[in-house]
Amino acid sequence: MRSEIIQNQDTPLYSISTAAKMLGISVHTVRMYERAGLILPFQKESSHRLYSQSDIERLNCIRRAINEDKIGIAGIQRIHALIPCWEIVSCSQKDREQCEAYRNHTKACWTFDHPKNTCKTRECRTCPVYKESIDCTKIKNRIIGITEKYESTI
Amino acid sequence: MRSEIIQNQDTPLYSISTAAKMLGISVHTVRMYERAGLILPFQKESSHRLYSQSDIERLNCIRRAINEDKIGIAGIQRIHALIPCWEIVSCSQKDREQCEAYRNHTKACWTFDHPKNTCKTRECRTCPVYKESIDCTKIKNRIIGITEKYESTI
DNA sequence: AATAGTTGATATTTATAAATATCAACTTTA
DNA sequence: TAAAGTTGATATTTATAAATATCAACTATT
């Protein structure tokens, strides 16, 4: 049986220049989004970034939000800060109290170091909080979902 | 006993030109915010608008969000759409199903006509959903508050 | 060892959102 | 019934976010 490398949507494949080419934008723009905390590219041992198919889609979403929907980078950051991450990752009350991201309302949780709580063992790139945050519909649906979840228990 | 008019933060007092002067902006800018659904001025029988002290503060908040925080008008609209209004006004499951605002993720609930649900009897100007939406901190705290509320019941 | 590509930084350009100016028609109130 | 203010609309200006260009130093690949 020959060994096979499993590849999926999340496999980091493309270099930054390839990714930029696929999106029709400059390399620098991609890095701008990264600095703003909108995307977390894969970093192998080396310092070079790699992008997966999911990353390309995510970048496309960011692009639409900025250019079509006219939500700016700062707007996206604020929206990200509203995602109820503590619910998504089932963060304990105690963890929340120590979590910077929980209280913050200016940027996404994955832009913080959070060594103290349940997230310390998670890789943000694969975390559902990060992965679900690509558009406003999903974010609102998540907020709706939480209230529905609780209501069904009552 | 002479009759007295009760005045508070919410009493509509100022004309649009007075409001604009208080804020140091043009009349048209104030109307721009209104058209975008960021503010709901009081409309007496006449067609002229009136603004309360709360309205002035709200406009100041909008101003800060746009000019300092660099969240654009479109960004504010999207953030408003994320407020869990259904929880705040205790909207029934049935009402939600019929509510456009519930599903929408581009603008605030108070920018919709909602003649079918519990909100039909409410005046949006005085509704806590509208009044609490002036800044991101309050909105995030509201989302937090909902999850906490439910957790305490379990 | 040479080539192609990446990094991070600064400086510049471009696109456009936000704000203003101007208008005629209409309202209010003094 | 005048004067002052408001409305709604369009055209224009201004401020700046988003994107690009350019750079030298570094990294990976052949």
Image (cartoon, coloured by chain):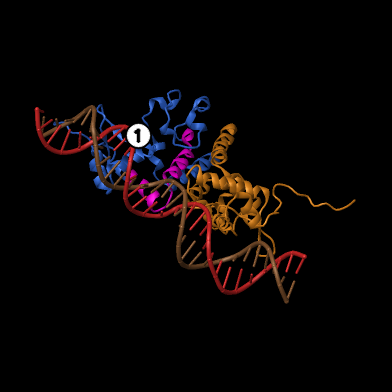
Chain colours: A orange, B blue, C brown, D red
Disc 1 crowd, CA 10 A, few/some/many (<14, 14-19, 20+): some
Q: Position of residue C25 (x, y in %)?
A: 24, 28
A104 relative position to A123: left or right:
left
Q: Is residue B128 above or below residue B25?
A: above
**Residue type for callout 1:** Arg
A134 relative position to D3: left or right:
right
Instruction: Check disc 1 and report the residue beneath it.
Output: B125
Q: Position of residue B129 (x, y in %)?
A: 42, 37
Query: What residue lies at 49% left-to-right and 29% top-to-bottom?
Result: B100
Residue range in magenta is B58-87
Magenta stretch contains residue B69: yes
Query: What residue lies at 45% left-to-right and 23% top-to-bottom?
Result: B116
Q: Position of residue B149 (x, y in %)?
A: 51, 40
Magenta stretch contains residue B61: yes
Q: Is residue B40 above or below residue A85?
A: above
Q: Is residue D25 above or below residue A31?
A: below
Q: Main secondary structure of the magenta part?
A: helix
A133 relative position to D12: left or right:
right
Q: Position of residue A116 (x, y in %)?
A: 59, 58
- Name the one closer to the observer, C6 or B41: C6
Identify the image quadrant of residue B18: top left
Query: What residue lies at 50% left-to-right and 40% top-to-bottom?
Result: B146
Name the chain under label 1. Answer: B
- Name the one closer to the observer, C13 or D8: C13
Quarter of the image where the C terminus of chain B is located: top right
Identify the image quadrant of residue A18: bottom right
Residue A89 visible in this rendered orientation of the protein:
no
